Structures are given as structure tokens and as C-alpha cells.
Amino acid sequence: PTRRVRGDESRRWRRVDRPGARRERSRGEVSRYRSGRLATPRRAPAAPRRRRSETPIAGYTPATNVIPHSQIDLDQQEINAAVKSDGVNPIDFTQAWFVYSEGGGGLCTQADIDGASCLPQADMAKCSKDGNGPCSSCCYKTTSDPKGNSVKGSGSIRTLKGFAMSGEKKMSTEEMYPIYSAYWGDANYADTFVMSAYNDANMSPTMKNELIKKGTAYQANWMYVLHEFEDAIADCLAGDIYANDLTPSGAAPHAWDEGWAFYAGSLEGEDGTKSDGVLQYNLANKRGGRMMTAVAGASGTATANVRALAAAKTGRDLIAKEQCEEAKASMASIKKEMVLPLIQGTIEYAYKADPKSDYPCKYEGDDACLKEWGEGWAFAAGALPLIDKCDSKVAAMVVANLGVTSPITAGKETPETKAGEQVKDGYVKVKQQVESVFGCLGLTCREVGEWTSDGNVPAGMEACTGSGGGGGGGGSDDTPPPPPGKNKKTKKTDIDEVPIIIVCVIAAVLLLLSCCMFMKWRQTEARLNELQVAKGGTMA
């Protein structure tokens, strides 16, 4: 794979292509790999000066260096590989757990440990501070410890489990995390979701695969992305925008950059066209292609990513200008685009997981659609707290149809569904129920689209329209559908209103003339009576 390493002789990220290469983050040394072995590091120099322009990540140019942050996707990539049999390597859930909990990148070798650039152990907290450069992740470690993919300047390793377990400490005052932790009744709900699947000895490996890899990416990492954007707004409001050199590289711009780094990851390339990613950016592209909401319909970048990127750029620039309140709108836009593919996935896999649908959901001899069921539940679980906030009955219905019984669903009235009995109400009903909360979620029928396979849309999977939740509008409607049960169409007859207006005017004129003639006749009659009386008689 292609990896990025940083050499102090150029202060730029250089591309080094060597299968299996791993970047050793040490204190500014030349991290050049030769024949698969790490070169002996030079003496660590002082921390490098920040560049004016950082390396773009999927079309976004950060104000600060967040390349190491973006490499958290390499952990996700290793997890995905470990939980799926590729015909050569068997499924290894223990390895997936190790990478999730401790970090990937392989283990520290003795050469890594001996050559690590470190401060005295008592001073390791000063790495990347007080003029010191970053320290190695293998400082004072053993050959049983991970080298790490996403390594901090302190030498500590970022992990997806760390993301999943950080909510109560870091996010309790933010907008999104309290909604999720309250719905699940669990401060560490994302970790519980992942570990419940990992620890379930009776769960099909096919389903376990989907719940683990999607739980780590679309719950643990998903929430941490939003945390970084929310944290950036808080730092901006606190005035932490500029660094000592008066460039917009303080805590607020850095946190905002981290948000996009964790959203896209390092595998999408500088312009976001590699399609090798495993995080939110790639998820949006996959769902967009299948739901016909990519730029080119079924191909190209998802319109959700186009809008998210535009919002990220706008928010970055607003924060740099100290326009913190205005940046909140950018954060709200990104949140909406992150919810969209979860909703798309829920609809798609409700159809695919339904044993009564016409989708051929056999997978590796599994005729109970367990792979599709696992995917449907993973996507639904990522959006359920927001669905519940909109309409608790809709959320309960989704759980009843796609829920997988586990500790995370305690108290959610999840039925003891047997394989082959999931989606008991049918995918069309599930789809219509989810569509009923589009307006509350800020989504439209056009944005969600319709699931298409080989140019065909299965019955009941048509895009909804503003005049009915049942579909058939081809995704052309920009308004949310009404709630189920209120989608009866009223008969409409096209009538030319001009002749009606003319007839009404003529009738009014005739009525007025009739009234005048009647009044004239009454006056004439009265006058004749007067004349008759004057002559001594009366009119008969």
C-alpha cells in the first residue's frame, strides 16, 4: 500500500511505496524504510515549523497538520480485513478486537524499540511540547505492543475504542452524544454495540462481521467526527483560534480539521476520488451510488459528500475569521449529511433482509439473510436515537423489524427474532415509517433517493414524494413525505377558471339590472297610484 512519511530534510510528506511499510513517528527523524526495515534515526531536532498549506484530504485543505489523525482509517481497514474471510486468510475476530482496542500497524519490533526517539520516561509528557519534537509510539514498549497507525505527538496511539469510550468525558455537554447515550441508556453505547457482537458465541460469523466493522466505523468513529466539529465551535467561542505565529492554527481550527480528517480518512486521496476509504466519506459514496444520489446518479461522488465538503470548507474559513456563530450552520449541514447515508442504508437493507422480498439474500450458503440483517441493524442503530427523538413509535417499529437482541437493546422490546423471521412487517412498511420522519431529520425524498439494481427499482422501493409516502415519484420531490396513513391522494380536476369568472361577472351585472328595473317599476307604480288618488279613484 501507499503510505506517507515525513522527512525532516524537506518538511513535506513524501510518498513511499513498499508493501507492508509502516510509518514510525519519531522526533523528526528521517523515517525512511529500506528493504522493509526502519533506518537508524538521526538525533531528533526541534519541532518542525508549521507549513502554510497542509496536504489536502479528500478535497479539503486543512489549516493544520491532521494527516496522522486521518490514518485512523488504517485501523478500520485492518478490522474489516480481519472479520472477513477472503479465501486466503481465515476470519480472525481476536485480531479485530486487538486493533479496535489497542491499535493497528503491526507490533513494535526490537529494532523499532531500540531505535525509538524518546525523552526520558519521566518526561514523555513533554513530547511535542516545549520545543520537543514528537516521540515514537514504541518508546518503552515491548514486542507485544502495537506500533499504531494514528499516532499522537506524545507517542500514544489513537484507537477506535478510545473514540467509543470518550463520550462521557468529552461530549456530555455537546448536542449529539447526550441524545445517543440517553436513548441507549449507556454512556459507552458504541463500545457496547461492538463488544456485544464480539462476545456473542452464538452469533453467526456473517452477522458478527457486519456488526463489528460497521459499529466501529458508523457509531464509534461517526460520533467522534461530530465531537470534533462541535469542539471546534466551542474553542472558537472561547477565542482559541490563533497560534503564537498569528496563523489560524489554534485549538478551534485544529479541531475542525480533525473532524474532516476522521470523516474522510487517509485512503480517499487528496482529491477524494480513490474510493479506497472505509469511513463516512466512503459510506456516503456507496449509499449514494446505490440510491441514485451520486453526482452522476449511480456513480461518482455522492451529493452528500459534495455538500459536506462545501460545509467543511465554509466552516473552516468562518472559524479563521472568528465568525463562530455563523460556523454553527456549517456544522449542522455536516451532521445532516452524516445522517443521510445511515437512513439510506436502513431502507436498502430492510428490503434486502426481508425474507419475503424478491432480493436473493443468500450469502455463503446462508439462506436466512443474516448478512443483510446485520447490515440493516448496523445502519439503523446508527440513526435510531435521532429517529426516536422525532417519533418514538417509528423507532420502536424499526427495532422490532431489524433489531438484534443483545445487551445494547435491553429495554427496547426487541423480539427474540429467529433467523428468517426478521422484518416481520415487511420492508415497504419499514420504509414508509422511516420516510415519515424525513422532515424532522431535515431530509427530502430527492436527497434519500431510491434503491436501484441494474437500472431496475424493486416494487415498493421507489423514491417517496411529497404527496405520498409510498413512492413512485422518482426522487424528484424536494419535500418530505407525510406520515404514513395520511398519504391518500385527493382527486384533482383541471378546470379553466377564466370562463367561470366571465359567467359570474355577467350574472352579477344581470342581477344588478334586474334590481334596477324592479325598483323603477315600483316607482312607476307608486306614481300611478298617486295620480289615480288625485282624480278621486284608486287603481285596481
Image (cartoon, rainbow, N blue to C red):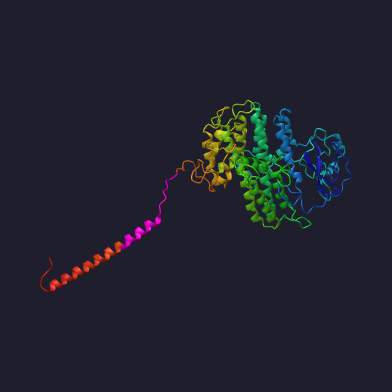
Which residue shows up at 72% across the image and 55% down it?
A: 241
Establish if 226 lies above or below 412: below
Q: Position of residue 412 (x, y in %)?
A: 56, 35
> From this viewpoint, is residue 411 visible?
no
In the picture, residue 96 is in which quadrant? Answer: top right
Question: Is 394 displayed left or right of 499 in the figure?
Answer: right
Picture coordinates of residue 159, whole percent (x, y): 73, 39
380 in the magenta segment: no
Occupied quadrant, residue 176: top right
Q: Give left or right: position of 356 versus 326.
A: left
- Residue projecting furthest to the bottom: 534
Side of 495 relative to 442 (left or right): left
Question: Residue 102, position in %: x, y?
Answer: 75, 36
Residue 392 shown left or right of residue 206 in the figure: left
Bounds of the magenta segment:
489-509
Residue at point 53% right, 30% down? 356
